[in-house]
Image (cartoon, helix red, strand yellow):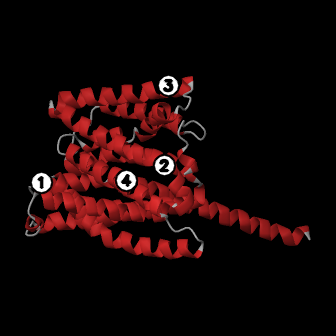
Amino acid sequence: MSASASPLAESGVIAATRARRIGIALAATGAVLFSAKAILAKLQYRYGVDSLDVLALRMGLSLPLFLVLGLRETRRAKARGALPTRRDLGLIAVLGVLGYYLSSLLDFWGLEYVPVSLERLILFLNPTIVLLIGLFAYGRQVAAREWIALAVCYAGVILVMVENLRVEGDHVLLGSALVLGAAVSYALYLAMSGELVKRLGSLQLVACAMVVSTAATLIHYLIARDAAALFGLPWQVYAFAAANALFCTFLPVTFTMAAVSRLGAGSAAQFSVIGPVSLVFLGAWVLGERITAIQLIGTAVVLGGVVLVSRPGANSVPIERK
């Protein structure tokens, strides 16, 4: 009996180990790909487009992918009786505007003024902003070690920002403020989406929110300028936009969700630290951005603080329970 059970147990261990390795690879790849959207946006800016052009192309080209995902998830939700109510649809509309339209618009706008390494570092403050939202909006308690971690995070960002001011110029302040606005907008999305994720599932929510944000982006574009401006751009702009839509928008979402199913939300989230680190070196390699010792030290300080805040059970707003 025990002899026959042993191969089964060993097989189970092998399968679990394999699933964990695949989950780690998916989480790491998703973090790098999602961060690389800043690289592609910077490359597009070289051809005379601006943040609204970049966002409209990204959202428009990724829309068919998310529509297919949304239809699949809706069929699954219907089978298990988890279709969104009218109230849910209203909240999804708000979340779509906050999480993928406003946040992305401010992010791409900020990228016109700051290097990609600083942009990703500011966006990486999301867990700390969610914690502060929990404090002021929900009356959650914040432990002493969390305050210390917050202080460490923001001290690291200030250190990197001051160094970028020295290297890049005063426009870094405007860009940093815009990217921080993007981080706050996305943190609001995270803090408000908890109950919906529980009821609808993360993929269904993301697909619906992306459809809403695409509509908001295209409406903004049509109000701000002629739709014909999106046509006749250099082919490189469309190539980078297609890569952004597929490799830096759709795939990171699906990779991250697949990683969560194999590792759990807490373990998968820890691999997001790879994003800011990868952009420090990708920005230097692809875009020729300068790397200084102070920038590296500041990046390490921020990563350490965010890891402390993001440990399971540390967040005042429990992201893992969404």
Q: Which is more N-terminal, label 2 or label 4?
A: 4
Q: Is residue 34 left or right of residue 23?
A: left
The disc placed on residue 60 is none
**Disc number lying in front (4 or 2):** 4
Residue 3 % position (x, y): 88, 69
Q: Residue at x 37, y 58 (%)?
A: 93
- Quarter of the image with the N terminus is bottom right
Residue under label 3:
147
Q: Tag 1: Cα neighbours inside 10 Å, few (<14), some, or many (≥20)?
A: few
Q: Nearer the viewer, mark 1 or mark 4?
A: 4
Q: Amino acid at mark 1?
A: Arg
Q: Nearer the viewer, residue 11 or 245?
A: 245
Residue name at image x 34 percent, y 65 percent: 211
User: Decide: marks 1, 2 in contact (CB < 8 A)?
Assistant: no
**What residue does disc 2 label?**
271
Please name the amino acid that badge 4 sits on.
Val
Q: Which residue is mark 1?
A: 46
Q: Earlier in the sequence, mark 1 or mark 4?
A: 1
Where's residue 117, x and y in %? 29, 41
Which mark sits nearer the N-terminus, 2 or 3? 3
Q: CA gap, disc 1 to disc 4?
A: 33 Å
**Disc on res. 94:** 4
Could you tell me if residue 166 is visible in this image? yes
Secondary structure, mark 2, is helix
Label 3 amino acid? Trp
